[in-house]
Image (spheres, grey):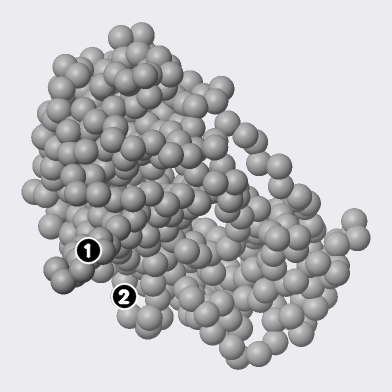
Amino acid sequence: MEGNKLVLVGLTLSLLTACGGGSGGDNNSASVIVETIKGRVINETTCGNQSYPGVEVLVHDNAGKIVKRVKNTDDGEFSVSWDKGDTHISFVKNGVNLHAKTLLNVSAGDLGLIPLKSDATNNCDCTYVNFDTSEIAPLYPNTQLLPSSSNVKVCKVEGKYQSINLALVPTQDGVAPIATSIDVNNLINGQAILLKAEDFNGEYRQGQAITLDGLVSGDHLSTGSVSNRQSGADQQFSWQQSAYAFPQQFGEEYVSASHTQFHNLPNGTSIFYLSAHTQQIHDANKIYNAEINRDFAPLLEALQPVLEGVAANQATSYDFSQYDANISAVNFELGSQAWDWSIEGAKSGTLPLIELPTDAVHKINLSTSFNSSLGLILVESKNSTSYADFRQEWAKVSRDSYFLTDAKVSILHISGKI
């Protein structure tokens, strides 16, 4: 059954990439090289990336019409031929709620991991642990243990609890920060885990304070140092107006800063604006520019044609290239409580009339979705200036994590009837 056509736009924080594949053939033989596009659809949980089977994979032509339909495998993987004229690809899971994602203007190759929302709750094997600081307290005065919560949640990934990263950060000047990583697999017995002096011994455990420039004052401003990005444990330390890095202890170290604003417009629409910037730490002695941009007005102006196009149910051109030269990708969101659809594309282009299966379209009704929301994410990456470059970079890092270094993400949410 042929599906109906709608212009829908959506949001996703998890970004994907595609590697371009070459095409061609041997003029001296009858053989034809068949190009394919492949990847793995997953559901992100606190206990790692879980395979997401039963997802319908749709291949679209340039106008958005469905030209191929396949289902992914039990392990979430898919592979489909990518012929001349194939342009866009969508992933649809229609259960209690509808979850859809569309990637515009992709090329043959490996898309990497593709996170898609799910109706299912996270059935992870998790527990809470407490730490006893009685032994280290007199040895490390004027410090605070992070995470500061008395109960730290830890979950099993592939049958094993992930190590918990802990940091002793100074509460006054002149005190060096120290970090450690605790393997709790043989220590969980219902009692508090005693932290010992040897857990924090060694110069390699010492960290350095990070100086951030370009921050703005505000109630919602927060900065933090992010250690190795793992699932299944509390890995992020956050505090106000300061950050520390432990590159020898954790191997890879990042510093992040964010600022949020809330605005109520006269027509009853509300805007949530967030700027977040993450940088990998190469030298703890240098000043890192957070480059937090709070000017949402140009974003709203550039988004207006998209709003009008969605309301008119027609293909819509958009252009966010004037906002920032470093923008590599754009994500849109349109959804409500029962459905969501994300569309990812270049910083400028056209949102075509993307076709979805009829049973999916039946759950989407713009005229009655009063609580629907439209979101926009601009990905500004210093490592890539084009959408193709960004996808290639993300395909590599998406094998292991969802962390793009040296990138700034701006988010604009609009709530209300479209």
Helix, strand or loop at mark 1:
loop
In the displayed image of the protein, which residue is found farthest to the left?
322
Asked whether the viewer can see residue 63, the reply is yes
Q: Which residue is mark 2?
A: 287
Q: Nearer the viewer, residue 27 or 7?
A: 27
In the displayed image of the protein, which residue is found farthest to the bottom?
203
Q: Is residue 247 above or below residue 404?
A: below
Q: Amino acid at mark 1?
A: Ala
Q: Which residue is mark 1?
A: 30
Q: Find residue 77 and name its label.
A: none
Helix, strand or loop at mark 2:
strand
Residue shown at 75% from the left, 50% from the top: 126
- Quadrant of the image for the N terminus? top left
Mark 1 and mark 2: Cα distance apart in space: 60 Å
* CA neighbours of label 1 inside 10 A, class few (<14), some (14 to 19), many (20+): few
Residue shown at 31% from the left, 71% from the top: 288
Name the spot of residue 21 as percent of width and height, x first. Answer: 26, 63
Q: Nearer the viewer, residue 358 or 217?
A: 358
Name the spot of residue 211 as percent of width and height, x first. Answer: 37, 72
Name the spot of residue 210 as percent of width and height, x first. Answer: 41, 73
Asked whether the viewer can see residue 337, the reply is no
Residue shown at 73% from the left, 72% from the top: 182
Name the spot of residue 273 as percent of width and height, x first. Answer: 31, 39
Q: Is residue 245 left or right of residue 387?
A: right
In the displayed image of the protein, which residue is found farthest to the top?
368
